Amino acid sequence: MDEKESRIVEARLKLRERFLNRMKQTPGASDSRPLGHGPTNRHRMPKVPEGQTITSGWPVLDLGRQPNVPLSKWELIVDGAVEEPQHLSWKDFLALPQVKDTSDFHCVTTWSKMDVEWEGVQLATVIALARPKPEATHLMTHAYDGYTTNLPLEEALKDDVLLVHTAQGKPLPVEHGGPVRIITPQLYAWKGAKWIHRIELLTRDRLGYWELRGYSNTAHPWRNDRYS
């Protein structure tokens, strides 16, 4: 690990420490009676949340527009309640520490895709680079198609919440949010924006696209937490 990567890891760990107690209290980490079926899966949860059916495919859901953003023009902005706003090019993004992880993908429309192999950057890494202000509590993600969704930082900073560019060993297809989307394995998948463009740090919660239209603001699959 070189000096730059060491600094990035240190910043991420310090930020995570600030929110560690809140992270431990989230349902994904603390729920003693999760709703679901099948053998115990990751994070002590049942294999499949209540109301979900496993699919071998990967259905495509979006707002009716699939922006095709060339890598030469792709940019990730991290701003809002931060000390050092970031503007990352594709080259900058790939220069960040890369991770591989396997997790499940639960869509609120009742299907689950299991054991997806991902590669990308921990969301906590890019948030830490921007140095959130002490009063920052939430974030809003903004996509190239205009989609938005919100997350509390105690969910966003979990180790398996990733900005992914690769799925099952191949570049993330445009229809699934390529070149980069966010995945939130502990929450329903609408909490992870496709075609990610901007991450705005907030000092108070603000509802995103589906949250304003009646979907749950918390979105915990193992509580069947689909609608407000």
Image (tube, rainbow, N blue to C red):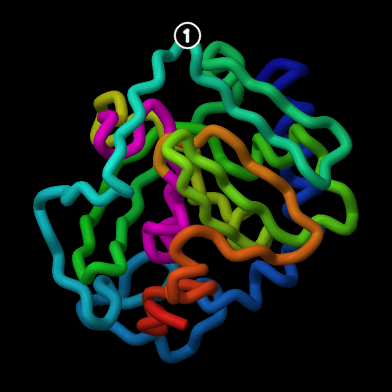
Residue at the limit of the structure toward the bottom, as seen here: 33
Confirm whether residue 94 shows in the render: yes
For this view, does 49 lie left or right of residue 6? Answer: left
**In x, y percent, where is residue 185?**
41, 58
Left or right placement of residue 3 versus residue 216 in this view: right
Give the total number of marks visible in the rendering.
Answer: 1
Residue lying furthest left in this view? Answer: 56
- The location of residue 147, given as percent across then percent down, is 46, 47
Q: Is 185 included in the stretch rendered in magenta?
A: yes
Q: Quadrant of residue 89?
A: top right
Q: Residue at x 65, y 30 (%)?
A: 77
| Camera sees residue 100 | no
Q: Which residues are magenta?
A: 173-193
- Dot 1: within a 10 Å radius of its alpha carbon, few (fewer than 14), some, or many (20 or more) residues? few
Instruction: Give residue 107's position: percent from left, percent from top.
Output: 29, 63
- Tell me residue 23's x, y (percent): 65, 67
Q: Quadrant of residue 137?
A: bottom right
- Direction from residue 81 to residue 224 in the image, left or right: left
From the viewer's side, name the closer residue of 37 and 3: 37
Please report the residue visible at 78 percent of the width from the left and 27 percent of the height from the top.
Answer: 7
Q: Is residue 54 above or below residue 163?
A: below
Query: Magenta stretch: residue 157 in it?
Result: no
Tell me which residue sits at (89%, 54%) in the image: 134
The amino acid type of the residue labelled 1 equals Ser
> Which quadrant of the figure has residue 83?
top right
The residue pinned by badge 1 equals 72
Against 101, residue 87 (above or below) is above
What is the secondary structure assignment of the residue under circle 1?
Answer: loop
Q: Nearer the viewer, residue 16 or 77?
A: 77
